[in-house]
Amino acid sequence: MPDQNNIHPDAPSEDEGSDRITLTDENGQKQEFEFLDFIDYSDKQYAVLAPLEGEADDDQVLIFEVENADQENNTLIPVADEGLANAIFELFRNRNADRFEFES
């Protein structure tokens, strides 16, 4: 995951599936992810993303807080608090148990 705090989603290109997203950090570095789900938690919205092949471990997901979620241009901020990330991941896991295979 990029070290920068704020990562801005680019508009998906027409040839990409709707579940792919390219994030660009403030240094212009781009990284592609698969969008997995939005999770609402404590009056905030979070995006659960998986790096595309070759970007990281196959079983890794990354959780970002969605800032300005109700606007066209929003910012994704990596969740640094491990407790918060774990709580959001548990909601994601429970909600998506039929879509993904999770380790116990």
Image (spheres, rainbow, N blue to C red):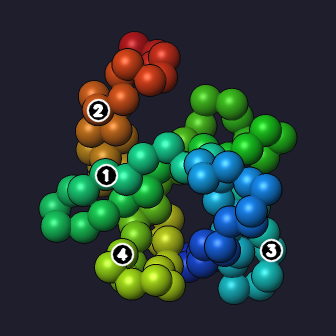
Mark 2–mark 4 distance (CA, rounded to whole Å):
21 Å
Residue 43 in the image: above or below residue 19 = below
Q: Earlier in the sequence, mark 4 or mark 1?
A: 1
- The image shows residue 63, relative to residue 22, as above or below, that is above
Quadrant of the rendered structure where residue 4 is? Answer: bottom right
Residue 13 placement, left or right of 91: right
Q: Label 3 to label 1, Cα distance in Å?
A: 26 Å
**Can the viewer see residue 11?**
yes
- Mark 2 sits on what residue? 95
User: Looking at the image, is mark 3 or mark 4 earlier in the sequence?
Assistant: 3
Q: Position of residue 41 (x, y in %)?
A: 21, 56
Image position of 56 with respect to 79: above or below: above
Q: Which residue is mark 3?
A: 29
Numbered label attached to residue 69:
4
Task: Verify CB contact (< 8 Å) between mark 4 and mark 1.
Answer: no
- Numbered label attached to residue 39: 1
CB-based contact (under 8 Å), mark 2 and mark 4: no
State if disc 1 and disc 3 touch (CB < 8 Å). no
